[in-house]
Amino acid sequence: MSFVSVYITARNVKEARRIAEALLKDRLVACANIIPNIESLYWWDNKLQNEPEAGIIGKTISENAKKIIKRVKELHSDKVPCIVFWPIVGGNKDYLDWIRKETQ
């Protein structure tokens, strides 16, 4: 079993909270941090965009990745939401044990 952080952007804090709460209720993440007021610059339809967004960082196990992607796509307002995973390569064993317990 490996641990990962999932990074998701949302249109605003309200959408981020709705997504985070759903992932928590479904036990797909053990913890979710919401980061308000992110300025996102990106290409869309051959135009450079500059939009305010909110971010979510969730802690989970890698086995939940496909379920998280599916659930976020169901809830997200964007056609192509940002959902990316970063490996957790180490950390507080007690915390990692807690993630395992809360996401199974």
Image: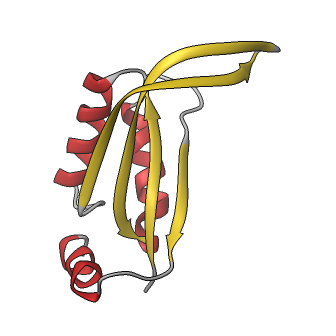
- Name which quarter of the figure residue 47 lies in: top right
Tell me residue 89's x, y (percent).
50, 80
Residue 61 versus residue 40 in the image, above or below: below
In this view, the residue in front, 65 or 91, is 91
Is 39 situated left or right of 91 in this image? right
* 69 to the left or right of 33: right
Q: Quadrant of residue 3?
A: bottom left
93 up-or-down from 87: above or below: below
Quarter location, residue 28: bottom left
61, above or below 38, in the image:
below
Residue pictured at 45% horizontal, 68% vertical: 4
Q: What residue appears at the point 38 percent right and 50 percent down from the top-left corner?
A: 57
The total number of labels drawn is 0
Q: Residue at x 25, y 23 (%)?
A: 14
Pick whichever, 72 or 39, lies toward us.
39
The quadrant of the image that shows the C terminus is bottom left
- Quarter of the image where the N terminus is located: bottom left
Q: How far across and how far down the image is residue 51, in percent?
A: 54, 15
Residue 18 image point, x, y percent: 24, 33
Identify the coloring: secondary structure
